[in-house]
């Protein structure tokens, strides 16, 4: 059995994921019933990632803070700055793309999405602040990463003043949880096989053609951020060719995030990638879960593109000032988007309110977002999650000045 496991691991994770993509697509098209049945593999994989992620974040942040030397620099401030710059740049790109390629929506009698959307920017920011002080046990159970980070940092700071043996126990717990995460990630090809097969079987390849133009604007904006804007930001920080790092992050983080459709579920994958890149654990153990909460370039694109598509459909003239305000509001709202599938869509009514678009129309736009979400939300999550590692590496002197 050990030889079989070792042989499996030697094949390499990325080649096996590519093979799973191809096989899953073929099964989903040729045998939809089998594809739907295989969906259980994807559900188990995503469920395992979501289950282990809160524990991983809490233990690693706790271990990093408690074991950190007093006065050590974790470089969190420059990473936060990069997160904000990246998200606002994405919002501006989305606004520009929407003006260059105006899109009309078919706003028919689409059933309203039965979920409560935030009604104001104040509500979004208030929710973020309240999450900081949520019950620590509830934060772990509900995957509230802002609360997890808050309590892990506070308890970690307190543990810096206890016996060395106690801090070593916390460090050993971090090693144990990391090992469990590695085992789960090793099974990613099977999970992705199930996710792809079930998705293709359920939606079909041609199901989204009616929204091709809208998807083109969304995906084009996301690709522009991933392959043009983000590399420029990284190059300005590192003074090196950014594309080896950009492509590595897209390949090893973006591909998995594309199919899990959850920044939160992809936290263990990003932690593993940061470790492989040789980044400082004191830094990435905090910046990665923080990025899964506030680094939402893809969400900013989704909110702005769909909002301006609704405005264009209704014949609303959007001035330069209004568009700039939308970019700011879209950026701030994106930081409050939930790190789960479709988390950004419920913030669209908030952005639509800037142009006095009725809530029932805004909720129809949300419903359209869920229809195209099989592609839109996957690409959005891939951009968001891969950028967490990208900006963490760019701001980490251990990586930036290597070679």
Image: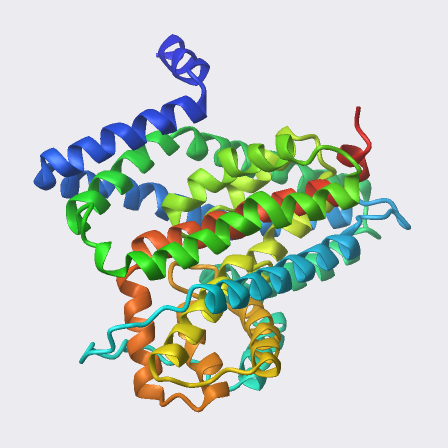
Does residue 50 appear left or right of residue 320 in this picture?
left
Is 261 above or below relative to 365? above
User: Where, quadrant-wise, is the C terminus in this rendering?
Assistant: top right
Decide if residue 284 is in sight here. no
Residue closest to the eye, 307 or 345: 307
Which residue is most to the right?
71
- Taking depth in this image into account, of 231 and 10 the one nearest to the observer is 231
Residue at left offset 76%, top offset 39%: 165
Left or right: 165 as drawn, with respect to 187? right
Check the image and report above or below for 96 versus 186: below
Quarter in which the N terminus is drawn: top left
Q: Going 26% across and 63% down the picture, which residue do you hit?
A: 371
The residue shown at (32%, 37%) is 191
| Nearer to us in this view, 387 or 63 | 387
Residue 220 x, y percent position in the rendering? 45, 52
Count of number-bearing discs:
0
**Left/right of residue 346 with respect to residue 161 in the rendered view:** left
Query: x, y (%) of residue 307?
Result: 43, 75
Q: Quadrant of residue 256?
A: top left
């Amino acid at each position: 059995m050990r030889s079989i496991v070792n042989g499996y691991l030697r094949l390499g994770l990325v080649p096996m994921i590519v093979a799973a993509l191809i096989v899953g697509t073929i099964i989903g098209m040729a045998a939809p019933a089998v594809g739907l049945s295989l969906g259980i593999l994807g559900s188990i994989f995503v469920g395992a990632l979501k289950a282990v992620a809160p524990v991983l974040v809490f233990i690693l942040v706790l271990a990093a803070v408690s074991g950190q030397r007093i006065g050590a620099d974790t470089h969190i401030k420059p990473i936060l700055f990069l997160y904000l710059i990246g998200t606002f740049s994405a919002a501006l790109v989305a606004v520009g793309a929407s003006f260059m390629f105006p899109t009309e929506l078919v706003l028919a009698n689409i059933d309203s999405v039965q979920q409560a959307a935030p009604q104001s920017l104040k509500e979004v920011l208030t929710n973020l602040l309240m999450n900081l002080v949520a019950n620590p046990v509830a934060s772990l159970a509900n995957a509230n990463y802002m609360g997890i980070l808050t309590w892990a940092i506070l308890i970690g700071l307190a543990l810096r003043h206890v016996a060395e043996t106690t801090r070593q126990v916390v460090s050993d717990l971090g090693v144990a949880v990391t090992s469990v995460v590695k085992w789960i990630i090793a099974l990613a090809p099977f999970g992705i096989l199930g996710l792809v097969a079930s998705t293709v079987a359920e939606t079909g390849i041609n199901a989204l053609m009616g929204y091709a133009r809208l998807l083109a604007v969304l995906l084009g904006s996301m690709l522009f951020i991933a392959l043009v804007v983000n590399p420029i930001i990284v190059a300005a920080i590192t003074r090196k060719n950014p594309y080896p790092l950009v492509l590595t992050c897209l390949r090893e983080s973006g591909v998995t995030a594309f199919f899990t459709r959850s920044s939160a579920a992809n936290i263990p994958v990003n932690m593993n990638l940061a470790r492989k890149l040789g980044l400082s654990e004191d830094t990435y153990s905090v910046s990665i879960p923080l990025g899964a909460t506030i680094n939402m370039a893809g969400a900013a694109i989704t909110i702005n593109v769909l909002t301006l598509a609704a405005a264009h459909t209704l014949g609303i003239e959007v001035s330069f000032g209004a568009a700039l305000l939308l970019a700011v509001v879209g950026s701030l709202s994106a930081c409050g988007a939930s790190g789960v599938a479709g988390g950004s869509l419920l913030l669209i009514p908030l952005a639509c309110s800037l142009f006095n678009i009725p809530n029932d129309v805004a909720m129809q736009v949300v419903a359209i977002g869920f229809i195209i979400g099989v592609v839109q939300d996957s690409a959005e999550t891939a951009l968001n999650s891969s950028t967490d590692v990208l900006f963490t590496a760019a701001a980490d002197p251990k990586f930036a000045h290597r070679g």
